[in-house]
Amino acid sequence: MLGLAALALSGCAGGTGGPGQLARFGLPEPVSDRAPFTGNLWHGFWIAALAIGVLMWGLMIWAAIRYRRRSPDEIPKQTRYNLPMEVMYTIVPFLIVGVLFFYTVNAQDGVRKHYTDAELAAQGMPAARTIGVIGQKWSWTFNYTDANVWDVGTVERIPDLYMQVDQPVNFTLDSPDVIHSFWVPQFYFKLDVIPGRTNSFQVTPTKIGSYAGKCAELCGTYHSRMLFNVQVVDQATYQAKMDELRSKGQTGQISYQTGTTQQVGSTQAHGGN
Ligand SMILES: [Cu+2]
């Protein structure tokens, strides 16, 4: 039964995650330091759900067979108002929800934890860089704050978000127009991009590669085109990319203003530099 459920899940995901996907209950291969929090939670929920499911299916089948009508004249014993039973099946779901809630809050705290540079240093990690993300109708702008360069995508040109492997990044998320959602499935993480409010999170990519990103909030006509690719690269490639953006004159930072919308296909509407 467990194998069947996992099989069905991996089928839905289109087999993008390799052979280990079955063991991950359908999740893609994780590539960020925060993925284990969500991954373990997902795993635990499935195991809890399957354990309860097996118990309940077992009880139902057992009751149906054990207390079935044995002759046409015989009516099984009728029971009503079994108070201890009713109290139990009121309290037990609350306990189950309470336990799931506890682990959910724990996982959320782990994912959203923001380490200071001193705390990162204590873990042997480099100081965090900052990348400012603007989600605009209908693409993404990336401000590489430390390198003082930017890149902006359009509906026609899907932008790349460059990150250095094993390098922590503090992200800020801003929107000039409507609510978007920054989602990199293989980071096991997404966060809403809300006009008038700067959201932030920290993440460290752990594996070199190219990973799909998208807007996870239905935001308008070209929502489905609001894609980006995360390129997790080594330090030399990262620096070369920053130099390339600089040589194209994309220096400074793109600003955004709440209430103004960017024109489709325009790279100038934000008035950068
Ligand atoms: Cu969007």
Image (spheres, helix red, strand yellow):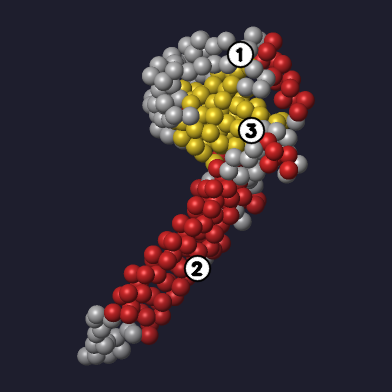
Q: Quadrant of the C terminus?
A: top right
Q: Which mark is residue 252?
A: 1
**Residue 33's x, y, as percent?**
65, 43
Is residue 6 depicted above or below 264 in this figure?
below
Is residue 138 positioned above or below 110 on the image?
above
- Between disc 1 and disc 2, the foreground one is 1
Three-letter residue code for mark 2: Ala
Query: Residue 85: x, y in percent?
Result: 33, 78
Disc 3 designates what residue?
A: 169
Residue 100 is tagged as: none
Marks 3/1: CA distance? 19 Å
Amino acid of disc 1: Gly
Judge left or right: residue 133 versus residue 73.
Answer: right
* Crowd tier of the residue under label 2, counting other residues whose Cα lies within 10 Å: few below 14, some 14–19, many 20 or above: few
Question: Residue sitting at 56 percent across and 62 percent down?
Answer: 3
- Nearest the eye: 29 or 141: 141
Looking at the rendered structure, the secondary structure element under dot 3 is strand
Quarter where residue 254 is shown: top right
Three-letter code for the amino acid on which mark 3 is drawn: Val
Mark 1 or mark 2, earlier in chain = 2
Marks 3 and 2, the one that precedes in the sequence: 2
Q: Mark 2 points at which residue?
A: 51
In-image side of 208 versus 74 (left or right) = right
**Eye-nearest disc, 3 or 2:** 3
Task: Report the residue at 63% width, 40% height from top.
Answer: 115
Question: Could you tell me which residue is drawn at 28 percent across and 79 percent down?
Answer: 83
Contact between marks 1 and 2 (CB within 8 A): the answer is: no
Q: Position of residue 208 (x, y in %)?
A: 71, 36
